[in-house]
Image (cartoon, grey):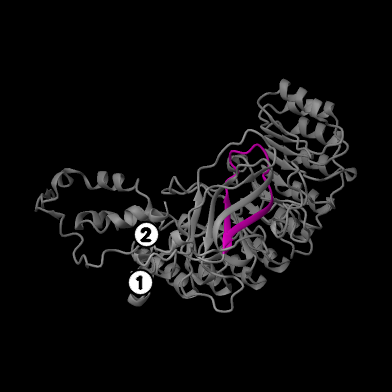
């Protein structure tokens, strides 16, 4: 046995010597051949909890508290191993498919890879860089959302960051449906890295979950010294190589020629010469973006098809955020002259994209844009928004969700995009003056998200302007707005009668005793979604008014109310046959027995009732 171990160690040393000096290799070889006992490197395994939350895409909580926020993932667990709905955990903003069914949801992008499942993410920094041997996610409620775990070569606490920031996937899988909501310690088998890391990214997809997933802590386990089996650097394949072949294809159309009568001449491309141009375009349109770019390198005929601007009318670069750079955009620039829908969400952070690269691409390709997704793009600055306002005159959809590092002054440029119909400003630092300017000029708005915009001083003034300027508004998200009163809500209901979705979750200044919710139900009879989350004052009269006036209602959240009884809920369920979602969690008068009874009577409605163990 000792001889076999010695031979194995000798082979490892020989392989290592390829990257070491000749002297080191000879010394190691003599040590084995002389019968000396080989001593394997010993490294102590380190367990550590996250030190700091660096970035995230969304959270259920407020920007000014710790309840249900991503910041709860820093440090040791607060809840685990207990199960249930606890405020001390980290909770993302959405779950299930309810949000995707709403009119305010954006259309999906073509060519999104089937292997890309991520909807939200969080990035965590740990004290010491290690070579990971395990990553453990402590899930305390409705587990199963984690779909990918990644590691970064950058040390976020270092004063000298590397020029080449690398992200590597430690583990990835499709979304899973866990049958039980009970807590668990999720520790998938991860691959070994060739570099130490103390920056971990967890990506989630909550579409299969029956309720909000809750995370309590993340543990990074690893060794300070490189494990011997990871000493040999494997060749790295960049799946987002967007460049063409090194050999210049000087005449991409040379393989397709037309005779005098307009017919194609066979130029040696086999059966491809017999296919109509449009049919080849259709075939090529089913390829993912990296495959499309690789195919350009095969022959001149396919190069022409793959570089046709019609293949790039829609472009989603979000799945490739870890590899995207100014160079990547430069390679795509010549092909995107007809670009209409662009998704750059999550891209460009930590210097990957610059103002120069972004501006160059937008000036060349932004003229026909109608949709621009820029969620969590922290490279954005005021000059970037200025470029957007100058180069995208026809823009109809703009998503700046969680761009929380944008200076408030930058948002004034949005008012120049007068054709906007959908605007998402969730978790941004937009101020009241900029918002009023936008509403003054962007009168075609249909969907507006101002959730968790804490810099707006008076929401009554904002919604009053909405009621006057944007009468065709279909959806409005005011999640956790701080100071909306019944006066502003009354003006909104009187001016925007076409509203189908209204989120007033955690708007604690609204009081049912003023009659504001009943007035709302009488005026907004097209309502399909209404969130009154955590408003303790919602009562039976409000529910009965909804039942009488809003037959199209599909989603209703009254979590946390103390004054709604089962009798009013039964009236609502009978009067609203299209109802799909009803959240009565923490409703004092609605216990588990009543929920079970209502579920039996109305099986097509998902009635939610969370619990705390």
Q: Quadrant of residue 418?
A: bottom right
Mark 2 or 1, nearer chain start: 1
Q: Quadrant of residue 454?
A: bottom right
Compared across the picture, whether 164 is left or right of 494 comes to left
Q: Residue at x 33, y 53 (%)?
A: 291
Taking the spot 71% from the left edge, 46% from the top edge, the residue there is: 502
Q: Which residue of the protein is positioned furthest toward the right in this rendering? A: 513
Residue assigned mark 1: 25
- Residue 577, given in percent of the width and then of the height, sits at 68, 26
Give the Cα distance between marks 2 and 1: 29 Å
Q: Which residues are magenta?
A: 198-223
Is residue 213 one of those drawn in magenta?
yes
Quadrant location, the C terminus? top right
Point 50% across, 45% down: residue: 173
Q: Of discs 2 and 1, which sits in the foreground? A: 1
Q: Nearer the viewer, residue 335 or 224?
A: 224
Q: Is residue 35 above or below residue 176?
A: below
Residue that mark 2 sits on: 237
């Amino acid at each position: 046995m000792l001889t076999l171990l010695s031979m194995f160690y000798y082979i490892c040393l020989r392989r290592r010597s390829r990257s070491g000096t000749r002297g080191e290799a000879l010394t190691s070889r003599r040590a084995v051949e002389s019968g000396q006992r080989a001593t394997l490197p010993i490294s102590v395994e380190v367990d550590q909890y996250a030190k700091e939350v660096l970035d995230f895409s969304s959270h259920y909580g407020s920007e000014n508290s710790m309840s249900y926020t991503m910041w709860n993932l820093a440090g040791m667990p607060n809840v685990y191993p207990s199960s249930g709905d606890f405020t001390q955990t980290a909770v993302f903003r959405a779950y299930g498919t309810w949000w995707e069914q709403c009119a305010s949801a954006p259309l999906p992008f073509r060519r999104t890879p089937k292997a890309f499942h991520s909807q939200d993410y969080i990035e965590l920094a740990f004290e010491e860089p290690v070579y990971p041997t395990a990553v453990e996610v402590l899930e305390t409620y409705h587990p199963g959302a984690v779909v990918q775990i990644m590691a970064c070569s950058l040390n976020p606490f270092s004063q000298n960051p590397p020029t080449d920031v690398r992200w590597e996937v430690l583990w990835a899988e499709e979304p899973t449906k866990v049958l039980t909501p009970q807590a668990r310690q999720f520790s998938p088998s991860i691959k070994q890295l060739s570099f130490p890391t103390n920056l971990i990214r967890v990506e989630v997809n909550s579409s299969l979950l029956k309720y909000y997933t809750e995370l309590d802590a993340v543990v990074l386990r690893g060794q300070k010294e490189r494990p011997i089996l990871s000493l040999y650097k494997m060749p790295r394949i960049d799946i987002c190589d967007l460049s063409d072949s090194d050999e210049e294809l000087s005449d991409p159309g040379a393989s397709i020629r037309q005779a005098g009568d307009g017919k194609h001449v066979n130029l040696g491309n086999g059966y491809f010469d017999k296919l109509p141009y449009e049919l080849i375009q259709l075939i090529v349109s089913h390829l993912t973006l990296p495959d499309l770019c690789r195919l350009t390198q095969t022959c001149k005929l396919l190069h022409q098809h793959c570089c046709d601007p019609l293949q790039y009318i829609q472009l989603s670069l979000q799945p490739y955020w870890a590899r995207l750079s100014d160079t990547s955009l430069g390679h795509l620039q010549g092909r995107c002259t007809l670009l209409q829908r662009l998704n750059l969400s999550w891209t460009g952070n930590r210097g990957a994209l610059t103002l120069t690269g972004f501006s160059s691409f937008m000036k060349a390709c932004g003229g026909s844009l109608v949709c621009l997704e820029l969620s969590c793009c922290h490279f954005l600055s005021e000059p970037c928004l200025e470029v957007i306002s100058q180069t995208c005159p026809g823009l109809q959809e703009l998503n700046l969700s969680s761009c929380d590092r944008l200076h408030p002054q930058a948002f004034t440029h949005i008012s120049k995009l007068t054709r906007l119909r959908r605007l998402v400003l969730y978790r941004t630092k937009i101020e009241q003056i900029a918002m009023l300017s936008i509403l003054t000029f962007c009168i075609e708005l249909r969907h507006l998200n101002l959730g968790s915009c804490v810099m707006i001083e008076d929401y009554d003034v904002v919604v009053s302007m909405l009621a006057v300027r944007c009468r065709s508004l279909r959806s409005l998200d005011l999640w956790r707005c701080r100071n909306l009163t019944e006066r502003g809500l009354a003006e909104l209901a009187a001016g925007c009668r076409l509203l189908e979705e209204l989120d007033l979750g955690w708007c604690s200044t609204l009081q049912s005793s003023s009659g504001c919710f009943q007035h709302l139900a009488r005026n907004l009879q097209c309502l399909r979604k209404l969130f009154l989350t955590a408003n303790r004052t919602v009562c039976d009269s409000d529910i009965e008014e909804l039942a009488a006036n809003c037959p199209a209602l599909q989603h209703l959240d009254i979590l946390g109310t103390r004054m709604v009884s089962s009798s009013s809920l039964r009236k609502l369920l009978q009067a609203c046959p299209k109802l799909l979602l009803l959240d009565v969690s923490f409703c004092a008068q609605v216990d588990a027995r009543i929920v079970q009874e209502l579920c039996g009577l109305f099986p097509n409605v998902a009635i939610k009732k969370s619990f705390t163990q």
